[in-house]
Image (cartoon, rainbow, N blue to C red):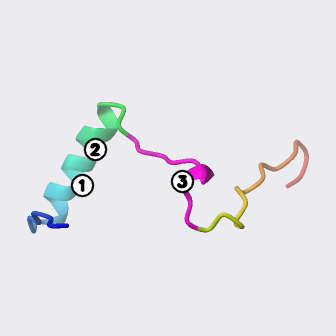
Amino acid sequence: MLFNVKVVSQEEYDAHMQDLRDAGQTGELGLEYSRQQDVQAPQQQQEGEN
């Protein structure tokens, strides 16, 4: 598999990532795509547990 790679400044990278977030492309994958199937999702704290 071949990839085209472009080296950019940190500022250009951050600006592009913000453009993607603004477009709703956050790209969060669920555990069904994890290579570590034995790892569980972090559990949310119950109310009052601080």
Q: Earlier in the sequence, mark 3 or mark 2?
A: 2
Contact (CB < 8 A) between labels 2 and 1?
A: yes
Q: What secondary structure predominates along the stretch shown in magenta?
A: loop
- Residue 36 vertical position relative to residue 50 in the rendered view, above or below: below
Amino acid bearing label 3: Tyr
For the C terminus, the quadrant is: bottom right
The mark found on residue 14 in the picture is 1
| Residue under label 3 | 33
The mark found on residue 18 in the picture is 2
Give the SS element for disc 1.
helix
Q: For the residues carrying marks 3 and 2, which lies nearer the camera in this image? A: 3
Q: Is residue 29 magenta?
A: yes
Give the SS element for disc 2.
helix
Disc 1 to disc 3, how far (Cα)?
26 Å
Residue count near mark 1 (Cα–Cα under 10 Å), binned few <14, some 14–19, many ≥20: few
Q: Is residue 14 magenta?
A: no
Q: Which residues are magenta?
A: 26-35
